[in-house]
Amino acid sequence: MNFQNKECLLNFIGFLFLVAQCLSMVEGEVHYYEFVLAEKNFTKLCNTTSKLVVNGSIPGPIIRVHKGDTVYVNVHNQGYYGVTIHWHGVKQPRNPWSDGPEYITQCPIEPGSNFTYEVIFSTEEGTLWWHAHSDWTRVYVHGAIVILPTIGTTYPFPKPDDEDIIILGSLYSGNLTAELDYALIYGDDLPHSIGYTINGEPGDLGPCSRGSD
């Protein structure tokens, strides 16, 4: 190899090193969340029932990140049933063990134990959601994921003045897991919802709506 070729090779290696340095500078941030699943009594539409929820609320916490960020979610199961959490719409390249489908990529998180998910937001932007992936527990175990553009980039549309998260859900009167088990054993009808909710609330038009909880 002559001197000119060696010089070109060294220049190319230097260029690759510079590119690697630039990529490391724009690497996403790391965020940590604690999800505590536990039963809590809620009174909605004159009906008081115990529901499995995350951090005591319906819906659960909002995850806010930028494209390229990584999130670690430590899920503590203080409920009565095994549960997994799925990050709906997140591709999770080469990271299927943190995707959440029960009995497909992991066993349920048993009551009294915990599991830490690694959620990699590689290409996603926009609004997605997370939810339980174990039978009907997703009815109340869910929440929004807000993925903003990479820091330093702009929206592909005029930046909004404000934003609100709206999550539509269903409301049930009994213990859904127990009712589902009963229906599967005896061939009974599956439970029907008694109403619909916006961000966990049935609104002011139904009975006992005002001043509930």
Image: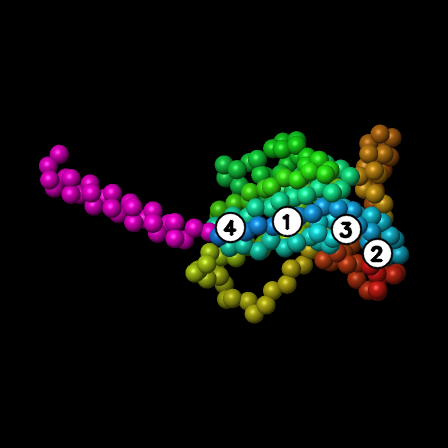
Q: CA distance from mark 3 to mark 2?
A: 11 Å
Residue drawn at 85 percent across, 49 percent down: 49
Picture coordinates of residue 95, whole percent (x, y)? 52, 37
Quadrant hosting residue 183: top right
Secondary structure under the numbered disc 4 in the rendered image: strand
Q: Nearer the viewer, mark 3 or mark 1?
A: 1
* 169 is within the stretch colored magenta: no
111 or 171: nearer the eye? 111
Q: Nearer the viewer, residue 33 or 129?
A: 33
Q: Amino acid at mark 3?
A: Ser
Q: Secondary structure at mark 3?
A: strand
The residue located at (66%, 54%) in the rendering is 61
The residue identified by callout 1 is 34
Of the two numbered discs 2 and 4 in the rendering, the one whose residue sits closer to the viewer: 4
C-beta proximity under 8 Å, tags 4 and 3: no
Q: Which mark is residue 30?
A: 4
Badge 3: how crowded within 10 Å, few (<14), some, or many (20+)? some
How far is disc 2 from disc 1 in space, using C-alphas?
27 Å
Q: Quadrant of residue 181?
A: top right
Dot 3 or dot 1, earlier in sequence: 1
Whether residues under marks 1 and 4 lie with C-beta atoms below 8 angstroms apart, the answer is no
Residue 4 versus residue 185 in the image, above or below: below
With 40 as the anchor, is 31 left or right in this view?
left
Measured as percent of width and height from the top left, residue 139 is found at 74, 46
Q: Nearer the viewer, mark 4 or mark 3?
A: 4
Name the residue beneath numbered marker 2. 44
**Residue that carries the numbered disc 3 in the rendered image:** 170
Image check: 177 left or right of 21? right
Residues shaded magenta: 1-28
Mark 4 residue type: Val
